[in-house]
Each structure stands twice: as C-alpha cells, then as structure tokens.
C-alpha cells in the first residue's frame, strides 16, 4: 500500500504498510507511549498514546524507534488508517521523491520496545 512517505523530515520508501499497536505498557493510570518529534527520548513529546492504539510504522530502519502515522482512535485496520491518513498507493504515487508527510493524521517517532507489529 504505502510506497513513499516521510516522518520527521526523513524520506522513507516502503513497499507495503504494516499495522502496529501500542503494546506491553506497565499498565495503570498514567501508562502511555510518548510520540516524539524525532527518534530520541530527549526530543519534544508530541502526544501520548495508550495501550492498544493502532498506527502504521513507515520508518522502520532505526533499531530503537519507529516513525509512525496514526489516525484518530477507533480505526482498527491498516486499510482504514491508510485511507484516513491518505497514505495509500495512489496518494503516494503523486508525491515527489522528496516529500514530507503533512497529514491529515498525526505522525512522529515512538520507541520500538512498546510497539507490536500485527501484519508483516
């Protein structure tokens, strides 16, 4: 589905989208996964995602971080998220080789430790 996209200024070329979820948090009130502006725990936090939140990792080459695009809560399939976030193959085909993902969904970087890939 996803052919090219960019998160945090990093150009990414992918052959297909993968669905992932926030997984393995400690639990309890205040348990969340930080979404950051770049692949480093010291960078600014954009948002906090809770257990079970679905996302599409579009930057997967960093050993500790995923660059992700995530839709509003409630979308549960890769097709639904890709359509809502306009990161399907047709949209990707119209992008220049160097482009930045600008929405309509949110994007950022999350620590791989708390992400479970659901579809390869």
Image (spheres, helix red, strand yellow):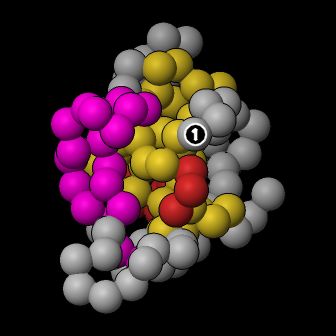
Position in image of residue 33 (x %, y %) = 36, 62
Left or right: 18 as drawn, with respect to 105? right
User: Image check: 40 left or right of 52?
Assistant: left
Residue located at (58% from left, 25% from top): 12
Where residue 21 appears, x then y in whole percent?
Answer: 54, 69
**In the image, residue 36 above or below residue 113:** above
State the extent of the magenta-drawn residues as a range: 33-51
- The picture places residue 36, in percent across and down from the top left corner, at 30, 41
Q: Quadrant of the C terminus?
A: bottom right
Q: How many numbered marks appear?
A: 1
Q: Residue at x 56, y 51 (%)?
A: 112
Nearest the viewer among 10 and 92 is 10
Q: Residues within 10 Å of mark 1 (few under 14, many from 20)?
A: few
Q: Residue furthest right?
A: 120
Q: Position of residue 109 (x, y in %)?
A: 41, 41
Residue at the spot 22% in from the left edge and 55% down from the top edge: 47
Q: Is residue 30 left or right of residue 66?
A: left
User: Is residue 48 rendered magenta in the image?
Assistant: yes
Residue depicted at x 21% and y 46%: 46
- Identify whether 108 is placed above or below 82: above
The residue identified by callout 1 is 64
């Amino acid at each position: 589905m996803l052919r090219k996209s960019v998160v945090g200024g990093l150009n990414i070329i992918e052959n297909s989208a993968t669905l992932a979820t926030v997984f393995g948090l400690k639990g309890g009130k205040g348990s969340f996964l930080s979404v950051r502006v770049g692949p480093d725990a010291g960078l600014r936090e954009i948002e906090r995602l809770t257990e079970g939140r679905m996302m599409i990792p579009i930057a997967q080459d960093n050993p500790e971080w995923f660059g992700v695009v995530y839709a509003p809560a409630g979308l549960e399939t890769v097709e639904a998220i890709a359509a809502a976030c306009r990161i399907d193959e047709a949209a990707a085909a119209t992008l220049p080789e160097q482009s930045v993902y600008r929405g309509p969904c949110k994007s950022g970087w999350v620590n791989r430790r708390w992400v479970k890939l659901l579809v390869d």
